[in-house]
Image (cartoon, rainbow, N blue to C red):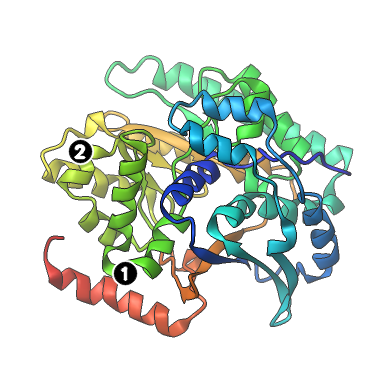
Amino acid sequence: MQQERHFGNNDLYTYTVKRVVWERFSNVEVEYAFRNRDSDVDLLPLKDKIRSKIQELNGLTPDRPFLDKLRGLKYLSDPFLEALSQSRLDTSHIEVGERDGKLDIRIRGPWFQTVDFEVPVLQIVNEAYFEAYDTPSVRNEGDRRLTEKIARIKAFVREEVAPSTESHPYGIIEMGTRRSFAVDWHGHVLQRLASELPEALLGTSNVHWATQFGLKTYGTFSHQGPMAMQALFPIHRSQRVWFEIWNEVFRGNLGIALSDTLGADLFFRDFDLALAKLYDGARHDSGDPFAWGERFIAHLRSLNIDAYRKTAVFSDSLNDLLSFEIWRRFAKRIRVQFGIGTFLSNDLGPKPLSNVIKMVRCNGFPVAKLSDNPLKGQCEDPVVLAFIVHLVNELVPGMGRP
């Protein structure tokens, strides 16, 4: 099925990061690489189909409703939006090929021009794979499952959240663009959520669908920001430098810090009193959510900060049932929000894929994501990876407070 392409069918963080790159890192060159985490799924036979679909992105430009949506956010400057309005997607930066017998996708070029491709290229890989499963019966099953989820969430809000006078509200942010079953299915899911679940849906990370359905957009930054800093600043300071630059650019807006680029230990070292006061909260994206939530609350308390006034966003492989359990554990102690992706945008019966596109080089230097889940870590240079692991786990702890 031919899917309609839109410049803004992308996560909000693409454009918030793009603003930082435009203002501070306009001359930086980067490389991203695709990684398929499903060892039992061979995507190589889809190489030509994926390449053809990626070419459909070429030449896409922002339309007026998309730009108006971003302008209404107030934290993307007019000069940046003027530059963005002149943008044109150039797929010559993307190479689809084969490496070690597997599908290989590389995105190379100036950071400002290539930052747009992570999310839509991942969406295209999923779309190409799931076309073989795209039948009326599969979509009907997806609708049946979505109906059940909506009913469960409604009941949970009605029976547990609404009667509680001490707990923060329950709210979900739809974050499923990159792994959606298909572009039109993603829109269908969001349309249903917007009309049938207004008591729980906070909004979406997808700018196009937020524009279409009048939803609020959510997102701050992705791993690529602090990863790129590894090549531009001393590695042990890279994450903190990104946090500080982010605050300088957005001046208190978008104050949710991603916590797992170099693991939780370094995050909590970097997220000291100054940053904890500047930021509204942090986002969990790997590792045990309950252990992380307890640690985040304890960390805030150790800084004499009232955790109840801060926010913890959970976004790692969530479904509704897990989000209920997390809410029950933490909602009386800290504001909680839930970024739910694949479970909403690609739950129709066929097993969803687990794939990512991450930055692997910045100005020619290898960069790494360690994560709090070994399966989600990534670095293409084993020597650099070994050094960063040693730095984070052994050298930095001996340095004392930053």
Does residue 80 appear in the picture of this structure? Answer: yes
Residue 356 percent across, percent down from the top left: 59, 59
Q: 338 or 106, which lies in front? A: 106
Residue at 64% of width from left, 43% of height from top?
177
Q: Amino acid at mark 1?
A: Ile
Residue hosting label 2: 277
Residue at 48% of width from left, 24% of height from top?
156
- Badge 1 crowding class, 10 Å Cα cut-off, few under 14, some 14 to 19, many 20 or more, is many
Kind of element beneath mark 2: helix
Residue hosting label 1: 235
Residue 387 percent across, percent down from the top left: 34, 80
Give the CA separation, mark 2 to mark 1: 24 Å
Q: Residue furthest bottom?
A: 383
Q: Amino acid at mark 2?
A: Lys
Q: Nearer the viewer, mark 2 or mark 1?
A: 1
Q: 261 or 160, which lies in front? A: 261
Residue 109: numbered disc? none
Q: Quadrant of the C terminus?
A: bottom left
- The quadrant holding residue 324 is top left
Q: 50 or 172, which lies in front? A: 50
Residue 293 vertical placement versus 104 (above, below): above
- Badge 2 crowding class, 10 Å Cα cut-off, few under 14, some 14 to 19, many 20 or more, is some
Residue 182 percent across, percent down from the top left: 76, 43
Looking at the image, residue 108 sits to the left or right of residue 285; the answer is: right
Asked whether the beta carbons under mark 2 and mark 1 sit within 8 Å of each other, the answer is no
How many numbered marks have been drawn onto this rendered protein structure? 2
Kind of element beneath mark 1: helix
Residue at 73% of width from left, 38% of height from top?
6
Does residue 372 appear in the picture of this structure? Answer: no
Residue 122 percent across, percent down from the top left: 67, 54
